[in-house]
Image: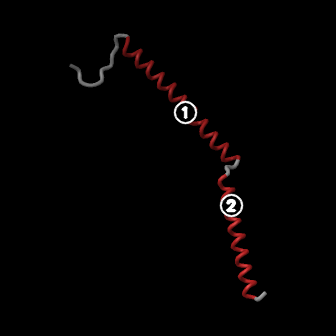
Amino acid sequence: MSSEEYWENEDRQRTERELRDAEAGLERSHAPSCSETLACTGCLAVLLLLSFLGAMAYDIVVQIWESLTSGGFSITLGPQE
């Protein structure tokens, strides 16, 4: 084997190794780690809690508004006729 063939073979093997490593790295990057999964689950739990608290706050505001407007005390929004 000549020196030129040797270096061509080395270059080809190095390129193949780099390609395999890059493909393996891509495959690893697509699988979420445990911490990423827990962070995603935690984020969803916080969003669910916030939506629940928002719904409760809305109900409280509606109850206050109804109690203010139903007992003879009224708040008029807009022009009075």
Q: Residue at x 34, y 10 (%)?
A: 72
Quadrant in the picture for the N terminus: bottom right
Using the image, determine if residue 43 lies above or below residue 10. above
- Find out whether the residues at labels 1 and 2 contact each other: C-beta distance under 8 Å: no
Front-lying residue, 9 or 55: 9
Q: Residue at x 49, y 26 (%)?
A: 57
- Mark 2: amino acid: Gly
Using the image, determine if residue 76 lies above or below residue 5. above
Q: Residue at x 71, y 65 (%)?
A: 21
- Mark 1: amino acid: Leu
Quadrant in the picture for the C terminus: top left
Mark positioned earlier in the residue sequence (1 or 2):
2
Hey, which residue is sitting farthest bottom in the picture?
2
Which label belongs to residue 25? Answer: 2
Front-lying residue, 7 or 79: 7
Hey, which residue is sitting farthest left in the picture?
81
Q: Indicate the position of residue 47 as horizontal and vertical percent values.
A: 56, 36
- From the image, tell me which residue sits under label 1: 50
Please name the colour scheme applied to the rendered image.
secondary structure
